[in-house]
Amino acid sequence: MLRQVYIIINDEIVYNRFYAQALDKSVFKDVLKNIKAEIISKLSTDFGNFNYFKFKLSYIVEKDLKLIFIFVTDLTDDFDKIKLELFKLKREFLDVFDNLNIDYTNKTNFEMINPFIDNIHKNLKPKISLIGFSGVGKTTITKLIRSEEIPMMHVPTITGEVSVIKIGRLFFNLWDFAGQEQFNFLWNKFIKGSDAVLLITNSTLENIEKSKFFVNLINEQAPYAHAAIIANKQDIEDALSVEKIEKIMGLKAYSMIAIDPENKIKMIQIIADILDIKNDISPLLKPLYERDKLILEVQNALEQENFEQTIILFEKIAELCIEIGDDSVANEFYEKSEYIRKNLNI
C-alpha cells in the first residue's frame, strides 16, 4: 500500500502527499540521509529500495537535476510494481515541469500532480484478505462493505472471490476465499502478499479455538500484514466478548453484526484503523468522513424542521459525493434538495 510520496530537489522536500500513517518528518529526514548515501554508492543505477522497520522505501533519481522521488509503502508491496510507478512519476513530473523550469520554492506549484499521484495510489492498492471457516460471515461482510444486499441465507463461496472495492476515493483488492476445509490447500497462496488480513469468526468459543489455525497461517504466510479479528455474530446468545476473544487469540478484535446494513460505516472505520489510514491524513478518505458527519447534521435539521438548512446540507453532501465519485448518490441528494425547494417554495 502506498502510504507516502516525497519529491526532493536540491536536498529540499518540495512535495509530499500522505495516504496513511508511516514516517513522521523528523524520522524521514534521518532516513533520507541513508537514501542519499545509497544513491552515491550506486553509480550505475538510478533506483533502489530498502526496508526501514515495517516500511519499504523505494526511490528513483535524476542525478543531473538533483531530483529524488520516494515512495513509502508496506513491506508486502512488490518492488517491480513500485518501480514501474516510480518511472511513470518521474516521466510525468519532468514533462509537466519542463526540466524544473519553475519556482520550486513555491510548493503550491506542485499540487497539479496530485491527481496523477492519486492514480498511482490506485494502481498500488492494498490487498485485504478475509479468512475464516465456512459460515462465519466473510461473504456477508464483503457485501456489507460493497453496500450490496445482505444475504440472509449462507451460500458457500467456492474457491474464492476477488473484488475491487472503493472506500471514499481509496481503492482496495478484497479477497474473500472459501472457508470449507476441502479448499485448505489454497489458503497459503491466497493469503500471501496481503497488506491486511481480517480473520472472521462467529464469536463462539468453539469457532474461536478452531480459528487459532488461521493465526498461525497469518504468521507463516503474511508476517508483515496488518492483522485483526472481526468478531462477527455478536448478537448470538453464546457470543464471547471482544475482550475474551483478544485474550484467547492474541490479536486486536472488533465486534460486528454483519447482517445489519447500518454497520457499513463501522466496517469502513475498522478497515481504516487496521491499515492506519486516518481521515485527517488521507486526502482520499477525508471526504467520506465529512459526508457522514453532514448526514448526521441533516437528521438533526429534519428533526427540528429546519428545511432551509436541510437543503444546504443536502447540496454539500451531493458535492462531496461527486468528489468521492458516487455520482448516483449525489443525484439522489440533489433530487431531495429540489423536492424540498418545490414543495415548500424555498
Image: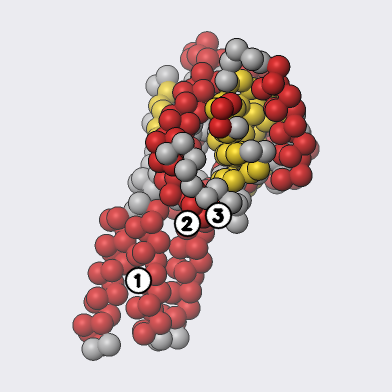
Q: How packed is label 1: few (under 14 Cα within 10 Å), some, or many (20 or more)? A: some
Q: Is residue 31 above or below residue 333?
A: above
Name the residue beneath numbered marker 3: 106
Q: Amino acid at mark 2?
A: Leu
Q: Residue furthest bottom?
A: 345
Q: Is residue 265 above or below residue 309?
A: above
Q: Could you say which quadrant of the image residue 231 lies in?
A: top right
> CB atoms at circles 3 and 1 under 8 Å apart?
no
Give the Cα distance between marks 3 and 2: 30 Å
- Disc assigned to residue 24: none
Per the rendering, the mark at residue 315 is: 1
Q: Residues within 10 Å of mark 2 (few under 14, many from 20)?
A: many
Q: Please state the horizontal and vertical placement of residue 60, each as a whole percent of the image.
A: 56, 26
Tag 3: amino acid: Asn
Q: Find residue 288 and name its label.
A: 2
Dot 1 lies on which element? helix
